[in-house]
Image: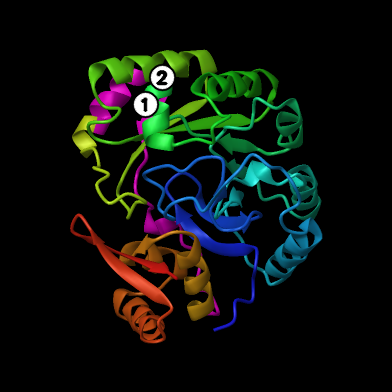
Amino acid sequence: MANKSRHLYGPVPSRRLGLSLGVDIVPFKTCTLDCIYCQLGKTTHKTLERKEYVPIDDVLAELKVFLDGGRNADYITIGGSGEPTLHSGIDRLIKGIKKMTSIPVALLTNGTLFYLPEVRVQCAGADVILPSLDAGDEQTFNVINRPHEKITFDLLVEGLCALKREFSGKIWLEVFFVEKLNTDDAEIKKISEAIKKINPDKVHLNTAVRPTAEKDVRKVSPEKLEEIARRLSPNCEVIADFISSHCRKTVADVPQTLLSMLKRRPCSLSDICSVLGLDASDALSHLDSLKEQGLIWSENKQGKMFFGAF
């Protein structure tokens, strides 16, 4: 099955952004980190090199086709298969999207490159930036996020603080909790102190509900996450599952859209039904067909089945 859209995927269900049209601008798993919980697997190209990994004009041309087809999304989200701020033309992408549509632009990033003034300037046109912070000190940062050797915890926090001072849009910080690694009282206190320095508009708590790069990553219970949220920040909330009411309509090319979704993130059956407007039997029929072709895999994650693409 040919992939008609090289750089766009979805819209996919997002717990924070409703229906999110993904924009992928770096090669698969090209990143500054190698997080143990990454749903896309281990980083294959850990780098700090910023360059034009894909032509921005090609990305914008694909977006025009999407919009001309009458399709819509709650957000256009720059993210995807790696760290998008590694793309040196991200400012041209954001400006191009803004000229084309009024759909707000979200930037899904690990936040590691905001210590660079040029990266902050290039990302200034986004409506909301969603960076990550999963630790309160260098040791835990190295264990959970496994950064490039030149990226330190202090550099990450310094960059996020500078972003908050300069950025006119919203900053929604995500903290990913892994049981036994960053969930004890001392770690939570350190993370809370870092959050106070950064002062984001929102704090979202997440945990391992999908297949992860390392198999022994343990999720935190909803009850414990709620308790941590109360301790961390008054503007802190546990990220809820995608709600099916966000769905607009059934998409035209189900197999292609489904495969494009699953190449970027594993999805549960309920995710697939929500975003594609299908009932469970129809969704399973498409999944069975793709599985017979050897294009997708399935994995049981703590009692819930997820599907992904090779």
In the visual, does 8 lie left or right of 259?
right
Q: Which residue is mark 1?
A: 140
- Circles 1 and 2, Cβ within 8 Å, touching? The answer is yes
Say what amino acid the circle numbered 1 marks. Answer: Thr
Position of the N terminus, as image quadrant, is: bottom right
Q: Within 10 Å of the Cα at label 1, are there few (<14), some (14-19), or many (20+) other Cα atoms?
A: some
- Give the numbered dot on residue 137: 2
Judge by depth and name the residue closer to the eye, 170 or 259. Answer: 259
Residue 47 percent location from the top left of the image: 61, 43
Quarter of the C terminus within the rendering: bottom left
Q: Is residue 307 above or below residue 14?
A: below
x, y percent for residue 300: 23, 63
Mark 1, secondary structure of its residue: helix
Q: Residue drawn 32% across and 67% down? A: 269
How far separated are the C-alphas under marks 1 and 2? 6 Å
In what element is the residue under mark 2?
A: loop
Magenta residues?
225-253
